[in-house]
């Protein structure tokens, strides 16, 4: 048995009441804010997890925004490619018709006019703008993707005017080869456009240098860039090692050396129809020294050395050629063009497939993000969302204990012997 | 035997019981007094008649002489008292810690926000919008707004923490004054008590007062009390005498310039006071560890973000098409471009303060060094030099890992150009500056010809921040240290604020080989902005955006073992949460323990009204009985008196 003093009784009572009041205050705060965790010290691990998931949700929102802002561009690209395809199919019909020996020169001239219109439409499509930006210009969005030269149509062989009305005579690409990217996952990016240099090429491009490469040695470490991919040339590399490095890089371009005339000429050719984008960067001059690039024109893609031979036809080249052949009543020319149109259609179909794959990937990503979004929100709710039923039950329990303690205290505290002494 | 013996005994009884009644009434009057220990009277008999001696009367003995009060003593258990002293220190310690850790938690305002992390996430989103809509002015303006929002939050957090520190510092000074004043009061009581005890009395109430003062003192600072046999007490603090009898050794405060002028607690003879528990100890810990470290980590977070975002931004192009611009404004600690700085403010440069050093040579992580050597990274926070050795077969990766896991306050990584980058980290000791590279020295080739950090090997080529013009020893580029307390001045660069079109969302290429980009990509390119998003969100700096990764890149280290911004911030919050939780639990535990001890003391020393009332009745009856004796004796004496007439 212990000795008990009055202060002991009242102190204990106060201590317990204080404890109950603290508990009630905590529960009230939680119910008021609908949160389980009020301060990190309530649950440090839960707090960290919560902050992580909240940032995850922000990431998901960011990816969704990228998709929302890029879908339109992707879908428009798809639509425009299909339009071009239709136009090329019509051109094919017309050219097959025109190759028929039965037609007259007059007839062919009329078909030529139609081809000219098709050409103009294709050029218009090539210069499509999406929200004020060039669709097919790569990242150069503030200029027209293709520069059009208009003049009287002249036969290059004879110098005579074939057609007096001023028409499109040359179409050159002004854009770059880079894409606009958007992020759809950690380290995952999707391109939302296709550069015109990939879309509008009908045949493979071949660039042959006419500067002998015999005895060429790189005098220092330099860098060349082909289609955006950097290739490191080391001091001491000769033309064969350079060719090996180019072929070893993951490119749609192959290099070879033509030694039939003993001059070791460098040849670059594409393996998939597109326009090559060649650059000497970092102060290097390798491609210039090898006679591929010009030393005075810095900006690709028309920076080829004037001495180099450049072969390759764009869709526009094919259509211009077809039109001019029709004007000149050149059946052989028309026949040759049919092959060019077939290649053009094939190139466009490849790009339609490519954009189709992008569209599917975007759709898959959207579905995935929806699921991840729900999952993250669920975790967040479980960690920091208050279980109201549990909280109210706790509150009731504490209230009951509190009331009991108060009642008992009220009975015990006031009594002393004095109440009973006379 | 005297005739008056009866009356005398009665008188003694009356007086004895009266004294008892007085003591009881004193107890009752003080029943609510927390500091009071109940007093009780010791009654014992007076020496009886007769002692064995020659002049002994020849009658039956011994006859008692009545009783008297031999002492009025307080009922007190010294063992419980000393336990209470100890635990009251601990209780006050954890209570103070709990209180201020909650303040810190409220300032950080997680997890229910609005919080800095949320603003950071918004900042990242704004960069993404600029990447998606590079030539739209509204996405750029939105980025500027969200950047300023985020910087504003950091500044607020920092300043609130700083204000709390100042507030705590004032409390520290107050507490020192309180300690001195309590010590003096104890000394004054000592003087009184000794006088009273010399006369043989028990100065019970004064003893109670002194005990209360000592208890108050122990809640402020952990003290030890030793009682010597002459009841003199000695109060020890940190094993040194605070109060001894009539002598007091006072404490004082000195402003410490290396700690923002905050108070240092010293004995009046100059030595530093080491406190282990009690309110003062908690205040000092919170002020100089918990809050200060949080502030340093915030600064570090910001410096690393500013530095790495600026690096990427400078290599990109705006719509404008300017390049080489910073996104965040940069203020350096000294105007000297070589980092020379006047630390002791005497008008002369005395140190070289540099934050970041890059090498000149391109290296890959798996390159083998080929020669062995020793790298001296200078003092760690304890002042000991950190030496790292490398063998000829070690790779670059191995040495970098060794540097990053050492105790040196420095981080190392390889940047996208393949160059070694060393950055200074915040210090955890007042003896060293924050975010400054302390010392670089290599006996071999790693830091010199291999990575191109230093021009020369050995001590002659060593870089040390405590000398001037040390930038001459560096082979590559370097950044002068940032001005202190970045969180208070961080802002966007003027060029960005005046023209949002300067925000470098697009990349470009280097035509002339000076390692700086000269020509921009098209205006629709958002790759540079995407790279900044990747930096801020990735675990790793390697981005699949680079159509061809330039060099094997290692993640950027922003603190020891931390390579990513968001987890770093999360861990800062988690650490605060864990410490606060531990303090709260300890406080609760101490509270229960302390209450238990106080109850034990109440058991022994507390006044029980019922008990006192019963004693009251007992003494009252005793008094009445003794008074009756006197009356009876008086009547008897009267008879004898009347016989003689």
Image: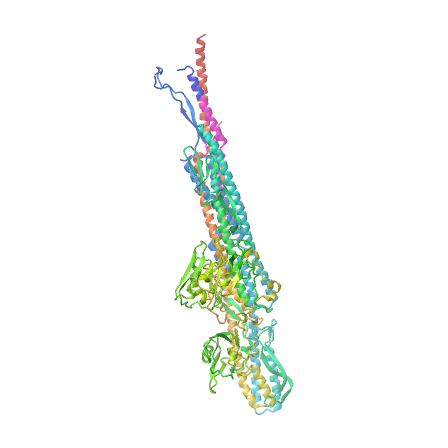
Task: Measuring from the top left, give residue A392's x and y in whole percent.
Answer: 50, 49
Residue B15 among magenta residues: yes
Above or below, comparing residue B347 to residue A174 in the picture: above
Occupied quadrant, residue A130: bottom right
Q: How is the image coloured?
A: rainbow
- For the residue pair B26 and A46, the one nearer the viewer reads as B26
- In-front residue for pair B348/B46: B348
Q: Quadrant of the N terminus of chain B?
A: top left
Q: Is residue B61 left or right of A320 when viewed as pictured?
A: left
Q: Is residue B57 left or right of residue B187?
A: left
Residue A408 appears anywhere in the view: no
Placement of B126 over or under A172, stated as above or below: above
Q: Position of residue B301 (x, y in %)?
A: 51, 58
Magenta-colored span: B13-38
Residue B128: image location, x then y, percent: 55, 65
Q: Quadrant of the C terminus of chain B?
A: top left
Whether A174 is drawn above or below A24: the answer is below
Q: Residue A96's quadrant in the figure?
A: bottom right
Direction right: furthest residue: A165
């Amino acid at each position: 048995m212990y000795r008990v003093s009055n202060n002991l009784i009242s102190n204990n009572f106060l201590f317990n009441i204080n404890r109950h009041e603290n508990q009630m205050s905590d529960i009230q705060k939680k119910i008021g804010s609908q949160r389980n965790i009020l301060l990190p010290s309530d649950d440090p691990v839960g707090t960290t997890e919560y902050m992580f998931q909240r940032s995850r949700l922000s990431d998901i929102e960011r990816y969704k925004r990228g998709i929302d802002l890029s879908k339109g561009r992707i879908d428009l690209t798809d639509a425009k490619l299909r339009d071009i395809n239709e136009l090329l199919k019509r051109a094919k019909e017309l050219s097959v018709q025109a190759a028929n020996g039965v037609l007259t020169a007059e007839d062919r001239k009329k078909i030529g006019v139609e081809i000219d219109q098709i050409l103009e439409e294709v050029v218009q499509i090539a210069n499509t703008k999406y929200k004020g930006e060039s669709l097919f210009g790569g990242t150069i969005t503030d200029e027209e993707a293709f520069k059009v030269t208009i003049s009287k149509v002249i036969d290059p062989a004879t110098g005579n005017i074939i057609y007096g009305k001023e028409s499109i005579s040359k179409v050159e690409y002004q854009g770059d080869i880079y894409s606009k990217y958007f992020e759809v996952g950690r380290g995952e990016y999707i391109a939302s456009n296709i550069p015109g240099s990939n879309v509008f090429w009908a045949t493979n491009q071949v660039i042959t240098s006419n500067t002998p490469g015999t005895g060429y040695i790189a005098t220092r470490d330099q860098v060349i860039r082909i289609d955006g991919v950097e290739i490191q040339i080391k001091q001491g590399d000769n033309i064969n090692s350079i060719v090996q490095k180019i072929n070893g890089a993951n490119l749609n371009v192959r290099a070879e050396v033509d030694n039939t005339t003993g001059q070791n000429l460098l040849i670059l050719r594409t393996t998939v129809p597109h326009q090559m984008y060649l650059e000497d960067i970092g102060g290097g001059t390798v491609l210039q020294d090898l006679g591929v690039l010009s030393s005075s024109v810095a900006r690709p893609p028309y920076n080829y050395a004037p001495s180099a031979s450049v072969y390759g036809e764009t869709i526009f080249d094919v259509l211009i050629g077809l039109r001019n052949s029709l004007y000149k009543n050149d059946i052989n020319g028309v026949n040759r063009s049919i092959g060019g149109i077939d290649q053009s259609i094939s190139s466009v179909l490849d790009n339609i497939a490519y954009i189709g794959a992008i569209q599917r990937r975007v759709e898959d990503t959207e579905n995935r993000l929806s699921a991840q979004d729900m999952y993250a929100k669920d975790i967040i709710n479980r960690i920091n969302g208050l279980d109201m039923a549990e909280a109210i039950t706790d509150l009731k329990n504490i209230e009951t204990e509190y009331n009991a303690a108060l009642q008992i205290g009220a009975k015990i505290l006031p009594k002393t012997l004095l109440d009973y002494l006379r | 035997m005297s005739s008056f013996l009866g009356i005398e005994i009665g008188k003694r009884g009356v007086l004895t019981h009266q004294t008892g009644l007085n003591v009881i009434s004193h107890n009752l009057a003080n029943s609510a007094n927390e500091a009071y220990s109940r007093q009780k009277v010791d009654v014992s008999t007076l020496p009886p008649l007769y002692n064995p001696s020659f002049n002994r009367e020849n009658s039956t003995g011994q006859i008692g002489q009545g009783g008297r009060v031999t002492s009025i003593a307080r009922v007190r258990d010294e063992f419980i008292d000393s336990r209470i002293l100890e635990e009251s220190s601990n209780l006050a310690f954890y209570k103070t810690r709990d209180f201020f850790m909650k303040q810190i938690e409220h300032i950080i305002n997680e997890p229910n926000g609005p919080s800095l992390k949320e603003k950071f996430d918004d900042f990242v989103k704004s960069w993404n919008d600029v990447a998606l809509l590079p030539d739209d002015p509204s996405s750029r303006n939105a980025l500027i707004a969200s950047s300023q929002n985020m910087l504003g939050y950091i500044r607020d957090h920092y300043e609130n923490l700083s204000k709390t520190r100042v507030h705590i510092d004032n409390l520290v000074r107050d507490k020192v004054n309180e300690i001195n004043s309590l010590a003096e009061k104890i000394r004054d009581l000592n003087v009184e008590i000794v006088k009273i005890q010399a006369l043989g009395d028990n100065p019970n109430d004064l003893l109670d007062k002194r005990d209360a003062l000592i208890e108050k003192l122990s809640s402020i600072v952990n003290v030890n009390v030793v009682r010597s046999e002459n009841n003199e007490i000695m109060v020890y603090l940190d094993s040194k005498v605070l109060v001894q009898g009539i002598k007091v050794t006072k404490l004082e405060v000195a402003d410490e310039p290396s700690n923002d002028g905050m108070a240092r607690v010293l004995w009046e003879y100059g030595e530093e006071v080491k406190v282990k528990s009690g309110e003062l100890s908690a205040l000092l810990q919170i002020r100089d560890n918990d809050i200060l470290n949080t502030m340093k980590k915030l600064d570090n977070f910001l410096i690393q973000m500013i530095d790495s975002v600026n690096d990427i931004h400078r290599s990109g192009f705006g719509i404008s098409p300017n390049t080489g611009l910073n996104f965040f404004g940069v203020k350096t600690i000294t105007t000297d471009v070589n980092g020379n700085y006047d630390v002791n403010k005497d008008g002369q440069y005395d140190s070289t303060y540099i934050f970041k050093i890059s090498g000149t040579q391109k290296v890959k992580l798996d390159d083998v060094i080929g020669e062995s050597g020793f790298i001296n990274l200078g003092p760690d926070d304890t002042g000991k030099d950190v030496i790292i050795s490398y063998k000829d077969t070690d790779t670059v990766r191995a040495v970098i890992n060794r540097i990053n896991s050492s105790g040196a306050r420095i981080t190392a990584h390889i940047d996208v150009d393949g160059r070694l980058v060393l950055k200074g980290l915040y210090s955890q000791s007042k003896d060293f500056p924050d975010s400054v590279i302390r010392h670089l020295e290599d006996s071999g080739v790693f830091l010199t010809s291999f990575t191109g950090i230093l021009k020369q090997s050995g001590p002659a080529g060593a870089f040390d921040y405590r000398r001037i013009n040390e930038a001459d020893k560096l082979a590559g580029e370097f950044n002068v240290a940032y001005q202190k307390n970045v969180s208070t001045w961080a802002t966007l660069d003027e060029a960005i604020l005046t023209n949002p079109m300067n925000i470098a969302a697009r990349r470009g290429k280097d035509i002339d080989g000076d390692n700086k980009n000269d020509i921009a990509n098209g205006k629709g390119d958002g790759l540079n902005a995407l790279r900044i998003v990747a930096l801020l969100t990735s675990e790793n700096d390697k981005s699949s955006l680079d159509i061809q990764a330039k060099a094997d890149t290692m993640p950027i280290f922003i603190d020891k073992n931390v390579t990513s911004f968001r987890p770093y911030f999360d861990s800062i919050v988690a650490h605060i949460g864990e410490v606060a939780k531990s303090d709260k639990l300890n406080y609760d535990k101490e509270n229960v323990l302390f209450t238990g001890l106080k109850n034990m003391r109440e058991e022994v020393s507390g006044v029980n009204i019922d008990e006192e009332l019963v004693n009251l009745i007992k003494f009252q009856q005793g008094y009445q009985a003794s008074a009756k004796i006197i009356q009876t004796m008086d009547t008897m004496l009267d008879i004898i008196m009347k016989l003689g007439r």
